[in-house]
Amino acid sequence: MDLIIELGGNPSRIYHVIEVAKRNQFAKIVISSETSPDFVVGLLRGAGINDDRFIFDFTAWDTVTNFTKTVKMICGLKPKKLYVVTDKFHMRRSMAIANAIYFLRGIALIPEPYYGSEPHQPESDELVNYDRWRSWVWRITGWLQYIKSIKDQRMPGIEADERRAREAGYPVTG
C-alpha cells in the first residue's frame, strides 16, 4: 500500500491530491490539519474517492508537526511509498523535514508539488535549515522545539475544524 499526505495550509492542494490519488488507486490519503473539512470531503467524494481512502489528522500546527504528529500512524500502515503534496515553493523545506522524520524507516518519499500557488518566492535557506534542525532534534531526542505563539494562534481554528469533521462523521484520527 502507498500513502498520500497533504500538508495543511492551502485547501487548493486537494485538487492535486485527487490527481495523485487517481494515478495511485489503492493509495490512502492523510489530510494533515487542513482547513474546511466540508470543502475537502466534498471535493474528494465528488472525485469518486470513498471515505475509506482518506483520514483527517488535526494534531499539527506547522510543517514539522505535519510529519511528527502523523509518523506513528503512517509507519503503522506500512506504506512502501509516501507521496508528499504541498505547494511547489514549500516542497524543499517539506522534503528536508520528511527526510529527517522518515530516515531509515523503509518508506520511499515522493514529492508531489502543487503548482497552483505560483509564482511564489522559494522559502529561505534559513527557514529550510531551521526546520531541518528541528526535525532531526525531534527524531533523535523526541523533543519538539516550536514557537508557542504560532501554535496558540493556529490551534483554535484547527480544533474547530476537527469538531466539525467529527460532527459530520468524517474519518478522523484518534
Image (tube, rainbow, N blue to C red):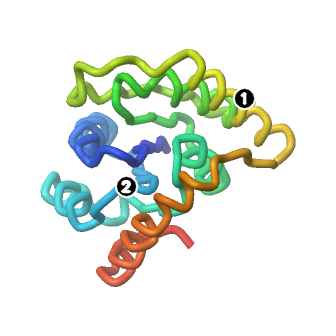
Residue bearing the label numbered 2:
34
- The local crowd at label 2, few if under 14, some if 14 to 19, many if 20 or more residues have their Cα within 10 Å, is many
- Circle nearer the viewer, 1 or 2: 1
Query: Whole-Å distance between the Cαs marked 1 and 2?
Result: 24 Å
Task: Indicate whether 31 appears above or below 174.
Answer: above
Q: Quadrant of residue 24?
A: top left
In front of the other: 34 or 51 = 34
Specify the farthest residue to the front: 149
**Residue furthest out toward the bottom:** 167
Which quadrant of the figure has residue 117? top left
Q: Amino acid at mark 1?
A: Trp
Q: Residue at x 40, y 18 (%)?
A: 122
Q: At label 2, which amino acid type do we have?
A: Glu
The residue beneath circle 1 is: 133
Q: Residue furthest left?
A: 46
Label 2 SS = loop
Dot 1 or dot 2, earlier in sequence: 2
